[in-house]
């Protein structure tokens, strides 16, 4: 009649069942560098350093934010893990790093093995897109801490780059050009504002069919974050890239100036690309000022490359050959004071 852990709210057997369900998906991300399987206290990874003169490890961590609420509402859990991976690997990619491995943290009020397996299936899919091994993770059942049906995710990526190949943006000068790689929609930023505009203010339903959208509104918003790793690494192998910016929270306005030195500004031509319809829908639904849109959302550009002017045509041609939607969106100019961005 006494208490045990299950009666108190934590089901160890459910946790063990979840591990069994995710084993094959996790193993599918392994390469020869992985020296351990599931169940160890730590993940073992032996990198091949033969192609590096002075290797430097680059790490990044992130979550998915309130985009998780859409996964809860729509009961779709097999793509949110791609977002989790993307947010970290795209960040370390901005310094020229090739992702090596990834770890995840999943916490829920009540552990549901099948749902956990769906989430990890997405994480494994993201790792395969990024060329990273999913070598470890933690699943925490925290009864009473989360609302029923809700969970939280965090991810941690480690990559590698030769020290003299680290991309810092210090080589960027006036006259360099800015290439934008198209996003797949909102990615994983700005969902608090998007939900407030679309659902609270405008009264849309998740199942709403909006002209111009390929999916219903909820599914369109849940579209996974694009992972740019393989594309950008291939460009780096053939060209000198002077700066890379991952366009996440803060949008173009805050992320591009992060890689510019003082006395430089980026002039971005808004009409050089067409943001997806979802951005216009959000702006109109919430009556949101244009500057606020560009400061909150990626507005159709998920990654930026700053390049030599002489390489423009070759890089754009190469990106097109790889099936990447990319366009010239601006130029670096001399400015005054701190680095900045001007939308023209």
Image (spheres, rainbow, N blue to C red):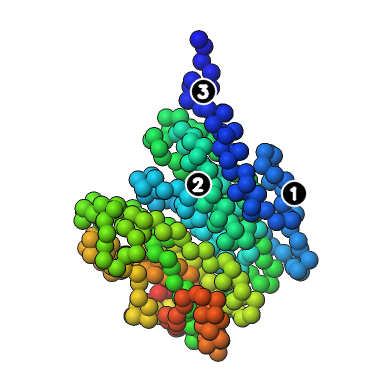
Who comes first in sequence, dot 3 or dot 1? 3
How far from the left and from the top, in percent, is residue 312? 52, 86
Task: Identify the residue at the far bottom of this view.
Answer: 310
Q: Would you say 58 lies left or right of 275 here?
A: right
Q: Nearer the viewer, residue 187 or 113?
A: 113
Who comes first in sequence, dot 3 or dot 2? 3
The secondary element bearing badge 2 is classed as helix
Q: Residue at x 67, y 66 (%)?
A: 161
For the question of whether residue 203 can be seen, the reply is: yes
Q: Find the distance from the CA under tag 1 to the CA under tag 2.
A: 24 Å
Q: Would you say 146 lies left or right of 287 here?
A: right
Q: Which mark is residue 119?
A: 2
Q: Find the distance from the CA under tag 3 to the CA under tag 2.
A: 23 Å
Q: Which residue is mark 1?
A: 35
Q: Residue at x 53, y 22 (%)?
A: 5
Q: Residue at x 59, y 33 (%)?
A: 16
Who comes first in sequence, dot 1 or dot 2? 1
Q: Residue at x 66, y 58 (%)?
A: 100
For the question of whether residue 168 can be seen, the reply is: no
Q: Find the distance from the CA under tag 3 to the CA under tag 1.
A: 33 Å
Name the quadrant containing residue 51.
Answer: bottom right
């Amino acid at each position: 009649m006494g208490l045990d852990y299950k009666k108190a709210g934590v089901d160890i057997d459910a946790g063990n069942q979840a591990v069994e369900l995710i084993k094959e998906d996790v193993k599918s991300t392994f390469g020869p560098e992985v020296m351990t399987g599931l169940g160890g206290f730590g993940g073992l990874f032996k990198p091949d350093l033969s192609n590096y003169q002075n290797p430097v490890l680059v790490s990044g961590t992130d979550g998915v934010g309130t985009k998780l609420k859409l996964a809860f509402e729509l009961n779709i859990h097999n793509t949110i893990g791609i977002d989790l991976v993307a947010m970290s690997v795209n960040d370390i990619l901005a310094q020229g790093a090739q992702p090596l491995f990834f770890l995840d943290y999943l916490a829920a009020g009540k552990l549901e093995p099948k749902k956990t397996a769906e989430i990890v299936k997405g994480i494994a899919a993201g790792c395969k897109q990024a060329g990273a091994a999913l070598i470890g993770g933690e699943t925490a059942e925290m009864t009473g801490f989360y609302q029923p049906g809700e969970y939280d995710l965090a991810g941690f990526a480690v990559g590698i780059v030769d020290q003299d190949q680290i991309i810092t943006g210090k080589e960027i000068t006036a006259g360099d050009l800015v290439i934008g790689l198209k996003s797949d929609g909102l990615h994983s930023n700005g969902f608090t504002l998007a939900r407030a505009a679309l659902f609270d203010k405008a009264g849309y339903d998740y199942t709403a069919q909006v002209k111009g959208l390929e999916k219903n509104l909820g599914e369109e918003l849940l579209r996974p974050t694009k992972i740019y790793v393989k594309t950008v690494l291939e460009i780096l192998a053939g060209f000198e890239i002077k700066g890379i910016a991952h366009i996440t929270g803060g949008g173009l306005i805050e992320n591009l100036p992060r890689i510019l030195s003082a006395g430089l500004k980026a002039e971005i031509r808004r009409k050089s690309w067409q943001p997806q319809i979802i951005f216009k829908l959000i702006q109109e639904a919430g009556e949101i000022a244009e500057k606020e849109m560009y400061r909150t959302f990626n507005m159709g550009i998920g990654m930026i490359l700053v390049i030599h002017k002489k390489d423009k045509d070759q890089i754009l041609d190469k990106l097109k050959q790889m099936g990447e939607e990319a366009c010239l969106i601006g130029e670096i100019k001399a400015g005054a004071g701190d680095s900045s961005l001007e939308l023209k």
